[in-house]
Image (cartoon, rainbow, N blue to C red):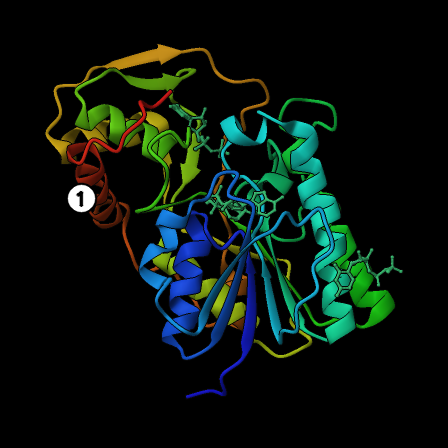
Amino acid sequence: MQQAKQILVTGGAGFLGSFLCERLLAEGHQVVCADNFFTGSRRNVSHLLDDRSFEIIRHDVTFPLYVEVDEIYNLACPASPVHYQSDPVQTTKTSVHGAINMLGLAKRVRAHILQASTSEVYGDPEVHPQLEDYWGRVNPIGPRSCYDEGKRCAETLFFDYWRQHKLKIKVARIFNTYGPRMRPDDGRVVSNFIVQALQNKPITVYGTGQQTRSFCYVEDLIDGLVRLMQTADDITGPVNLGNPAEFTMLELANLVIELTGSRSKIRFSPLPVDDPKQRQPDIRYASRELKWKPRTALRAGLAKTIAYFEDVVSSGHIRPAA
Ligand code: NAD
Ligand code: UDP
Ligand code: UDP
């Protein structure tokens, strides 16, 4: 086993962060989770609270943080359009001030630092599938910009701290990821469709449903993040992490109806402004440098996610999906 490290996970009480904390603890590390609980919750990490190697602190990354760690995974930021657009100024601050603070921390303690960037940096892409060298097509002034441009600026900061201060950085561009522990009211497509199907309510397909996304199961994604952190210092990324299997939203809706045995019907609603038409990662770089590829097919991952939401629905812990 590798040497135990002190690792900071910002956004560690969120969907991806909670799986990452779990994985790092299982590898024998000491984990500090810093989260302001904007979209995350203690419930996501309740099974870790008794672990003496796990510490949770309520902290907003837009403020400085002083801890002594070897590695930092910077995941703090709401990821669902519904949540990141509810307080857009705070979203940009979280990405930009959050990156500055975590980079400043990494600089002081000489920690390796990984940024959870996003496929959203490609915007509504004209290049398909998306390769890391594509610069993207992002609206700088639309309702999604707080997230897209915030994440782009965070990438800029990471690469400037790397050039200027010789920091050990890793930038992961994460494509749509799904799985257990997404919030029932998260607003993203997989959780919306599953919650609606389990309640036999209409499935809300936005636009024509012909837009595509490529969905990665959470455990595959976490494995990619951990592998990226472990690469040699000259591997900075940005590196695409996602499952290249691409689906239209109508295909996803029909698959969820089939797997849940739901009586739900599809209801078409207006397409949100600037909604990207297509999204598919080219993962050759990750496959070469990280020896990584996703293993969970959409059907299998959805089955696990549906089982989780069945428990949530039957326990009454549910706020209706949008
Ligand atoms: P999430 O909303 O479940 O988790 C985000 C976590 O960050 C939450 O626990 C939230 O409370 C916390 N947070 C938000 N603002 C904060 C702040 N100012 N200070 C401290 N904590 C704060 O979302 P997720 O899906 O787990 O996403 C995690 C990260 O991965 C995000 O940075 C997101 O942009 C990135 N990402 C996710 C996906 C995906 O499909 N899940 C895709 C691309 C990128
Ligand atoms: N910072 C932090 N924790 C630390 C060190 C720095 O949160 O352990 C923050 C601090 O608020 C600072 C930011 O990181 O504003 C950037 O730090 P850096 O050293 O790069 O710049 P400076 O301190 O010169 O602004
Ligand atoms: N979407 C949908 N119905 C929903 C939620 C989302 O059809 O109830 C669509 C949305 O318009 C987008 C796709 O599903 O085209 C993925 O949306 P999500 O918010 O999950 O992620 P992102 O747009 O950030 O990729």
Quarter occupied by the C terminus: top left
Q: Residues within 10 Å of mark 1 (few under 14, many from 20)?
A: few
Quarter occupied by the N terminus: bottom left
Query: Ligand 2 is in which quadrant of the figure?
Result: bottom right
In the figure, is residue 272 to the left or right of 95? left
Look at label 1 and name its amino acid. Ala
In the figure, is residue 152 to the left or right of 132? right
Q: Return the x and y of residue 160 as percentages of the image width and height.
A: 82, 59
Q: Is residue 16 above or below residue 258?
A: below
Residue topped by disc 1: 307
| Residue at image coords 66%, 46% | 134
In the figure, is residue 91 to the left or right of 290? right
| Residue at image coords 22%, 44% | 308
Q: Quadrant of residue 102?
A: bottom right
Ligand 1 under 8 Å from disc 1 Cβ: no
In the figure, is residue 40 to the left or right of 108? left
Viewer-closest of 121 and 98: 98
Q: Quadrant of residue 22?
A: bottom left
Q: Is residue 138 visible?
A: no
Q: Is residue 142 visible?
A: yes
Q: Return the x and y of residue 180 as percentages of the image width and height.
A: 30, 47
Q: Return the x and y of residue 14 as percentages of the image width and height.
A: 45, 48
Q: Return the x and y of residue 125 as percentages of the image width and height.
A: 60, 35
Give the total number of marks visible in the rendering: 1
The residue tagged with tag 1: helix, strand or loop?
helix
Viewer-closest of 162 and 252: 162
| Residue at image coords 22%, 38% | 312
Q: Residue placed farthest to the right in the image? A: 164
